[in-house]
Amino acid sequence: MPKITSYEKLLECYKEYQPLLHTRKDGAAHVDTKTVLICGGTGCQSSDSLHILAEFNRLIAEKHLEGKVEASITGCFGFCEKGPIVKVFPDNTFYVQVTPADVLEIVEQDLIKGQRVTRLLYEEPNKKEKVAASEDIPFYKLQKRVALRNCGFINPEKIEEYIANAGYQALGRALTQMTPAQVIDEVKRSGLRGRGGAGFSTGKKWEFASMYESEEKFVICNADEGDPGAFMDRSIMEGDAHSVIEGMALAGYAIGAHQGYVYIRAEYPLAVNRLKIALIQAREHGLLGEHILGTNFNFDIDIRLGAGAFVCGEETALIHSVEGGRGEPRNKPPFPAQSGLWEKPTIVNNVETLANIPILFQEGAAKFAELGSQTSKGTKVFALAGKVNNVGLVEVPMGTPLRKIIYDIGGGIRGGANFKAAQTGGPSGGCIPAQFLDTPIDYESLMSIGSMMGSGGMIVLNDHDCMVNIARFYLEFTVEESCGRCAPCRIGNKRMLEILTDITEGRGTEADLRELKELSQTITDTSLCGLGQTAPNPVISTMKYFWDEYEAHVKEKRCPAGVCQKLLKYEIDPAKCIGCTACARGCPVSCISGSAKQPHVIDQTRCIKCGACMTKCRFGAISRN
Amino acid sequence: MVNITIDNQQVSVPEGTTVLDAAKQANIKIPTLCYLHLEKSNFLNNVASCRICVVEVEGRRNLPPACATPVTEGMKITTNSKRVLSSRRKNLELILSNHPFNCLICAKSTDCELQTLAWEFGINTQRYRGERATHEIDKSSGALKRDPEKCIMCRRCEVMCNEVQTVGALTAFGRGFNTVVAPAEKKPLIESPCVYCGQCVSVCPTAALTGVGYISEVWDALFNPKKKVVVQVAPAVRVAIGEEFGMQPGQIVTGKLAAALRRIGFDGVFDTTFGADLTVIEEGREIMDRLKSGKNLPILTSCCPGWINFINYHFPTLKYMPSTCKSPQQMTGAIAKNYYAKKMGIDPKDMVVVSVMPCIAKKYEAALPYESTHGIPDVDYSITTRELAKMLKEGSVDLKNMPEETFDDPLGESTGAGVIFGATGGVLEAALRTVYEKYTGKTLEDVNFMAVRGTQGIREASIQINGRTVNVAALSGLGNARKVLEKIVKGEAHYDIIEIMACPSGCVNGGGQPYCHDRDEVIEQRIRGLYHIDRNQAIRKSHENPSIQKLYQEYLGEAGSHLAHELLHVESHN
């Protein structure tokens, strides 16, 4: 592939590559060829999606459909629960939970005869109706895919498709028609804020780094996604690595950097691989390296693999890790914009932030800022999980109320249970109770109700979840992931976890509750980095909104949700027990005694609270409190 | 200048000043624990890991650490609000909750900065009783003891080891509550690149890093009627041990020390300074040989075992450069067990040589198999200045009120040249005094080589000897040694003689010296003490030491003789 040596040539390529996407663009309904896109993300691949692709290709050859049908992988569609997903263009037919065995039917019925395979279509759970096109599925209807625009649309391993979708034009235009100051100004005017958690203004960050004189500066893409359950960054890297590369190159131009690094977890092999492919392609096309698009701008990107430490998501820890040191944060100031990688001015931007950059330039800052709330512009990708019907990645404009995300997009609470809380922001965030379901979600509103945006994890909890236990779970995570540098985080969080464990195991006291509050304050106030400063958040927010559950655990030694095993008590109602001995025979520790046809009794001192007796009893004689 | 307000006081400080230093100017002493600044050692620990020095800054949502927060114009700081004090106390209580409460039997009791802080804060309960991290004690080196359960993760040792000394033996390992400072992969120290300089010991606020103690072994020897136990005292000890008895740093207690050692039962009380003079003769000979031949230059001194370990690990290609001389400790031991024992009719096997050193690495050196003569170790036990102070106290000896006595002959006679071995530059100066006279045959009128004195890490001078310019340097601190050695490797620097001491400022600041606050000032005073002794000594050139002259006449023959080589040199230092 010859290098693209100017912005004009890039525009020519754009035109030349248009046919690649002709089945997928708006108004393509009349084309007579079809494109089958199969999700090639980590989730669907683990459900055999590459086998599905192979089946399509085999059958396309066998049925002589070459030229009429093309099958390829694409990035994550987001509706991961229904994977593997196969989408047929131009009809937008959305097949869910496809197996390799289903492919023949899709080929024969849909691709050849033009009839949709109804049984593989998505079924709306509330109405029990099949929905054919993705845009009609409620999960997608309210979404606005900006950062995820190319995921599920282009083949991430083909730079031609990225270029055909206007890729690298933002870079080309900036390099040829804008000064670095104008680029920064555009980002500032868009109101884009960091998607990694804290929500700092991206334009301001770039501006700070541009102000410091230095021969060398660096752009780092933070792809060390570590929040439990969050996978939007992985999906973007897997499905649209070029937009991250383009975003980084724009950042490099803006601040005067010539080298970028993508710091990505080694646990994301597919994302690493796609990124490697994209970097090679970008270099081959003259979109990275020296004299990009024939200009005097030089910029290249290398990959640095993280060894899987959550704290390396913190920018100074990340920088230490890139330098080859121990992943451990340091005090700020100085901020990386002044003294970062190898003590040079450095900006660290998250994957999702960078993926927003090219589209921001394509459409203009004003257009970008149309979406979102007063203080938070654009969209945010959430990883929706937990006790919700539709699990997956959802991208919505900032300011979308929680209720819309959980009930309209997420399809409501699974199994008809009641909503209890939404945990957002991962281990740094908090639990939002039902009273705030109508709060428009943005950086400020989440902070004001005791949670935070974080990287966008959203876990829905129902009334079978114990909030004390949830707080304990998150704290267990931060205790495990603390780097061990500062005392409040290293020891304080450990002590908090010990107290929470005591409470969930029936040893808690009222003094413990006071201690939890005090420790939370000190850890928040004095920890060195964001990890420690936010670690008590799950405790603080659950204590604030679910105080009664804490009290029940401490004062009554009772877990209202019936989760904390050590607080459970299984009892046999002598009035209902007929002495069938089923429970006694099923008890793994033989702690149930009683003669046949006589009411049985559980020895509470030996009971391990496994609940086996309760499932064995056919007379409803065993209760759990 | 930046204008700020601290506790309602207006203060003007230079840009870049930390809140901690700015507060000092306003006579506000913010408590610290992990923070430490030693200007002379080029050591700054501001990792801000303990979070004891936190303050409240108007407009900031959290409490930043004073030690690592630079002031900004208009900053309003409160150092003693309720929020600040309760956070400090809580963090201290948290640190204590993961620290053994066995202060009574701890090596650092009364010298422990954590203990002091807890006392100052009036902590009188054990607030948290959760899990305590457990770690193995590491005494594998026989010199430096690691007790990680006492570690409070202040990271001073790491900064010292990695940044000042550039040894790279210690690093934080593991995560969260189980994080521990250890050699890589938590291997025993003996398998690490540790050189046992002991500078980590001197900055450790607790007893997580100390020396391996030999007090009981020494007492056992002293109380063993079959053993003749002799002791030798290094130069740097006499200007420091007084501190353990309430005297001023730098106060000279040579005579009192001789008396004290006799009181606790040593059969012979010798001076390592004698060995230092002997080193000058042997090494002087080597210097002249190399200067004349122009080969294997520069010659590097070999008195300091920490430094010798360092070159072995880090610059193995330069191993031919150090002098083959044993250190003064080993020379004194070898002469005691051979020359002196023979004179006194003692079987060397029945003699125990104890050395009192300002040093941790000397313990390691004494135990090296090749630091011996005919299979008998030259030195049996090397104890630190601190250990001797404890022995004296236990042995009912109040050093302060001892009479002035002298060391025993012949290993007790010394010169000013030998005494200054305890300060950086002293070995080089002593060698130059002798080499000059031997090389030129002229009398050196002014014995003071001022250019090589001082506490800067790298000092250089050019000296004319017989029309030849001799380029010399005195280096202290292994980081400084590394800088110069790297230049030598690259061919960018050319020297003839270099003295290298592992510890910044030399042995006076050794890892076995009394713990001290205001260390920079204390070091200065100890150095002043040594030069004071030198100035007032009748004999200030090693080759004029009558006992040394007699030793050669009676026993060794001439410098570099076969016997001298057998007793006083090594084939190679590893």
Image (cartoon, helix red, strand yellow):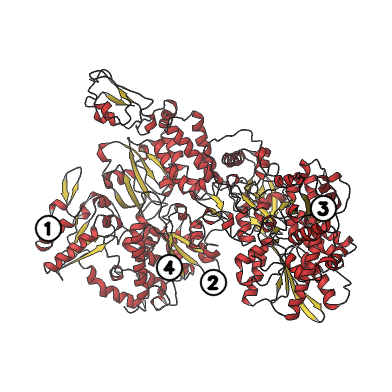
Q: Position of residue A304 (x, y in %)?
A: 44, 63
Mark 4 or mark 2: which is in front? 4
The residue lying toward the viewer, choosing from A458 and B502, is B502
Left or right position of A300 against A139: right
Query: Circle 1 is placed at which residue position?
Result: A105
Any part of residue A31 in sight:
no
Q: Position of residue B38 (x, y in %)?
A: 69, 56
Query: Circle 3 is placed at which residue position?
Result: B269
Give me the C-alpha separation between circle 2 and circle 3: 63 Å
Residue A302: image tag: 4
Q: Amino acid at mark 1?
A: Glu
Which sits earlier in the primary sequence, circle 4 or circle 1?
A: 1
Q: Secondary structure at mark 2?
A: loop
Q: Secondary structure at mark 1?
A: helix
To which chain does the residue with label 4 belong?
Answer: A
| Residues at marks 2 and 3 touching, judged by CB atoms closer than 8 Å | no
Q: Amino acid at mark 4?
A: Asp
Mark 2 or mark 3: which is in front? 3
Q: Quadrant of the C terminus of chain B?
A: bottom right
Q: Secondary structure at mark 4?
A: strand
Residue A215: image tag: 2
The residue lying toward the viewer, choosing from B37 and A2, is B37
Q: Do the residues at discs 4 and 1 belong to one chain?
A: yes
| Residues at marks 2 and 1 touching, judged by CB atoms closer than 8 Å | no
Which sits earlier in the primary sequence, circle 4 or circle 2?
A: 2
Mark 1 is surrounded, within 10 Å at the Cα level, by few (under 14), some (14 to 19) or many (20 or more) other residues, namely some
Left or right position of A331 against A225: right
Residue at left 30%, top 55%? A144
Give me the C-alpha separation between circle 4 and circle 1: 44 Å
